[in-house]
Amino acid sequence: MRTTVGIIGAGPAGLLLARLLHRTGIDCVVLESRTRAYVERRQRAGMLEQGTVDVLRACGAGARLDTEGLVHQGIELRFERERHHIDFPGLTGGRTVTIYAQTEIVKDLVALQLDHGPPLLFEAEAIAVESPGSASHAVRFVRGGREQVLACDWVVGCDGGHGVARAAFPAGTGRTYAHEYPYSWLGILADVPPSCEELVYARGAGGFALHSMRSPSVSRLYLQVPNGTEAGDWPDERVWDELASRFAVEGDWRLERGPVTDKSVTPMRSWVHEPMRHGRLFLAGDAAHIVPPTGAKGLNLAVSDVQLLARGFAALHRRGSTELLDRYSELALERVWQATRFSYDMTRMLHAQPDGDAFDLRMQLARLRRITASRSAAAELAANYTGLPLPDDVAGPPSPPGDQ
Ligand code: APR
Ligand code: PHB
């Protein structure tokens, strides 16, 4: 088997890249180790920046997103039993975010790919990327118990945090920067209408809680829990009681409860691999960087990585220019580090430090008070949350004033 771009992994990064390349007339093949049912079921975040919505629409994957996605004008911050609305359009010159689950994006992109797109092979596990520094590549993969080879000019590793692409970087050609947070998130999905109109980020007395949603009838909620917690440690009643306590405010707001349909624990870490390219091998999405979920930057970063790559491959295809591909790692990392900083700051501002003292809590509250009292501090949060612009030369027309 031979193709121009071999893509490892059919998460949002690999699927969207395949779609963008296909629309430019560049052939590619996607190898995915899991089954279609598995990738379509994985629960992940669901907050899309404006730029993510725009690119999904532009590549023909916006139909369901436009009817089912929930457009949000801001978020709520809760602390000391107070509620504070952060108004995104007012602070950013009109930007909003959209709630639409990553699983739904994956379903939409898989359907498009299987109907009209280049080959997408499920249960095809890449086991090695060969010759990453030379003029052509081979991805060895196993499918149906048989080892096969995909020969390609370029390889893009979209194979998540535990993939094989990164391992093909020769020793000494890259560096990883990592940070572990001393807490995890317990997430539940519940068949109950959301108790709020927008996402609520709460610094409760017992720690952080987030109220998100998937649809007008399905809520998604998270609780800060100690590292090492198992989902089984938290029966449903205990989860609801703790959520209710962390979201509690003065006044008559109430957390509605309902049947829990999914419960899982996610550790929190920040992790960046530099550079994101070696020779003709590129890394995109979680294969190159992981952010903690506070602020939901993971999916949005995966999308902006592959947008950059797709522009680079298009420039090569149309004009024979490798200039954008050559700048990929530098441009992508600039954005990755900004999102890493934002996720880190949000995480640290909202979670109870296990070894924290009264001073740490005062610092967190002072940060939160600054955001709710100062327009420029709130605007800084809103600009980062709704998504910093891509560089002008790769993103088309400049963004409107006021959203820097
Ligand atoms: N061969 C083939 N496929 C592989 C291999 C392999 N050796 N290793 C991993 N994969 C597949 C995984 O099964 C998965 O479907 O690569 C895919 C990676 O997808 P994601 O983990 O969803 O990563 P990405 O596409 O970068 O999306 C980033 O996912 O983790 C969230 O918060 C993150 O929302 C962000 C998004
Ligand atoms: C989610 O809806 O799953 C979600 C939303 C916002 C976050 C994290 C997760 O910051």
Image: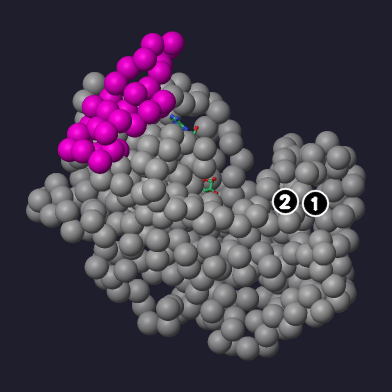
Give the residue type at disc 1: Pro
Q: Is residue 350 magenta?
A: no
Q: Is residue 152 magenta?
A: yes
Q: Is residue 329 above or below residue 75?
A: above
- In x, y percent, where is residue 329? 33, 57
What secondary structure do most residues of the magenta stretch adopt? strand
Magenta residues, as a range?
126-155
Q: Is residue 219 visible?
A: no
Q: Is residue 323 above or below residue 361?
A: above
Give the number of the disc on residue 185.
Answer: 2
Residue name at image x 80 percent, y 51 percent:
226
Confirm if mark 2 falls within 8 A of ligand 2. Answer: no
Q: CA distance from mark 1 to mark 2?
A: 8 Å
**Dot 2 surroundings within 10 Å: few (below 14), some, or many (20 or more)?**
many
Please tell me which of labels 1 and 2 falls first in the chain. Answer: 2
Give the number of the disc on residue 44.
Answer: none
Q: Is residue 95 visible?
A: yes
Give the number of the disc on residue 226.
Answer: 1
Q: Residue furthest left?
A: 319
- In x, y percent, where is residue 360? 78, 75
- Quadrant where the image shows the N terminus: top left
Confirm if mark 1 falls within 8 A of ligand 2. Answer: no
- In x, y percent, where is residue 145? 43, 11
Q: Mark 1 and mark 2 in contact? Answer it, CB < 8 Å.
A: no
Q: Nearer the viewer, residue 156 or 194?
A: 156
Q: Nearer the viewer, residue 37 or 253?
A: 37
Q: Nearer the viewer, residue 400 or 172?
A: 172
Q: Is residue 48 above or below residue 148?
A: below
Q: Tell me if 373 is positioned left or right of 7 in this view.
A: right
- Quadrant where the image shows the C terminus: bottom left
Q: Residue furthest front?
A: 172
Q: Nearer the viewer, residue 377 or 212?
A: 377
